[in-house]
Image: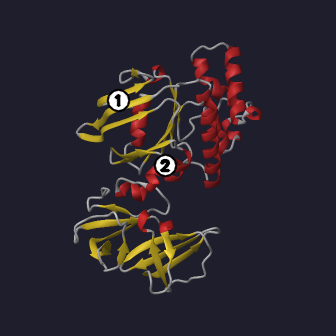
Amino acid sequence: MANVTIDKARKAYGPVEVLHSVSVDIRDGEFVVLVGPSGCGKSTLLRMIAGLENITGGTIGIGGRVVNDLPPKQRDISMVFQNYALYPHMTVAENMAFSLTLAGAPKAEKQKRVAEAAEILGLTPLLDRYPRQLSGGQRQRVAMGRSIVRKPQVFLFDEPLSNLDAKLRVAMRAEIKSLHRRLATTIVYVTHDQVEAMTMADRIVVMNSGRIEQVGRPLDLYDDPQSMFVAEFIGSPSMNLLKGRFDSAVGRPIFKTNDGIVLPLPASVSRSPGTEAIYGIRPEYFAIAPAGSGIPARIVAVEPLGPETQVTASVGGQTVVTMFHERMSVQPDETIWLQPQADRVCLFDTAGQRLT
């Protein structure tokens, strides 16, 4: 096990800089997920940790050693790729033992380590099969087993579940999280799927355009996003963002949208009337109010999800998504009255940064 320290890491391809002075400390035994949209730099950063991409500037340390100039095989890491990268002419056992074979490990040692990894991953009955005889989930477990037998200090995962169907992804998320608990090793995991990030990570690193937007525990990012980008990216459905400006009524602060809809604010908010801002609120923080006493919303779509009902509505000229933990008998074009929870509101300036 080891910590991973990334200090002002930069990556450029000629004049094009794709990572801009990225710094993050990953603690020994921690499960950290790098998440962000395609092209944000998360896979590039992972490959730099692995030594598959050269670093342009800054430092990367693993277990207290600066590894900038070390080749991958000397970094004591193991990487699980999106496409499994199994050898089709080798059995499961041979695939899992391949790195040990290259290292010249004794046969007894190889058999022992493969047996241990196969037991952890439920692969013992499959050791004599070939990759073509396995399901997608089984192949992914073999790829993970090949990493486990090496006993590296750090595991690196590059979108390992993206080729699996939805049901299998859920099962594999649980398996990888269970694997982390059993091995207690450091894991750096890349995904573009914020649900994977929320359910698996000890901490999440949200990346955008080659920069880190925010680092924190999953629920901290959900409850306390520091930018509109994080507010929209973390959470499904994402946070509602309504444009408008601060105002006051009867001595209390209020927020008035560009369509003239009045929204409540926490009493502690103090901003000059007329200042433009963005009003953010999660879908589950709306309640149904008695007719005429809340915010009028015309229903656009109703999506029953079993234990919850998702309702998309128009508030003035802006769309909001609400989530109710109950079944509702409402129809499109009906009007409902909504009451936001003022203490759950997040406010952002027009540049997308959180207002305190």
Q: Is residue 262 above or below residue 345?
A: below
Q: Is residue 222 above or below residue 16?
A: below
Residue sitting at x 57%, y 18%: 102
Looking at numbered disc 1 in the image, what kind of residue is underneath it? Answer: Asn
Front-most of residues 145 and 289: 289
Looking at numbered disc 2 in the image, what kind of residue is underneath it? Answer: Pro
Which mark is drawn over residue 105?
none
Q: Is residue 274 above or below residue 137?
A: below
Secondary structure at numbered mark 2: helix
Which mark is drawn over residue 218?
2
Front-most of residues 332 and 270: 270
Q: Say few, some or many: other residues with alpha carbon within 10 Å of mark 1 (under 14 / 14 to 19 / 20 or more).
A: some
Residue 200 is situated, as x and y percent measured from the top left of the image, at 55, 45
Q: Say few, some or many: other residues with alpha carbon within 10 Å of mark 2 (under 14 / 14 to 19 / 20 or more).
A: many
Residue 96 is situated, as x and y percent measured from the top left of the image, at 64, 28
Residue sitting at x 51%, y 73%: 287
**Left or right for 137, reference 19:** right
Q: Is residue 204 above or below residue 281?
A: above
**Left or right for 39, reference 277:** right
**Residue 143 appears in view:** no
Secondary structure at numbered mark 1: loop
Which residue position holds label 1? 54
Q: Quadrant of residue 315?
A: bottom left
Q: Quadrant of residue 177?
A: top right
**Left or right for 223, reference 327:** left
Pair 1/2: label in front: 2
How much space separates mark 1 and mark 2, taking CA atoms?
Answer: 30 Å
Front-most of residues 210 and 264: 264
Residue 36 is situated, as x and y percent measured from the top left of the image, at 42, 49
Quadrant of the rendering where the C terminus is positioned: bottom left
> In this figure, which colouring scheme has been used for the structure?
secondary structure
Residue sitting at x 43%, y 45%: 216
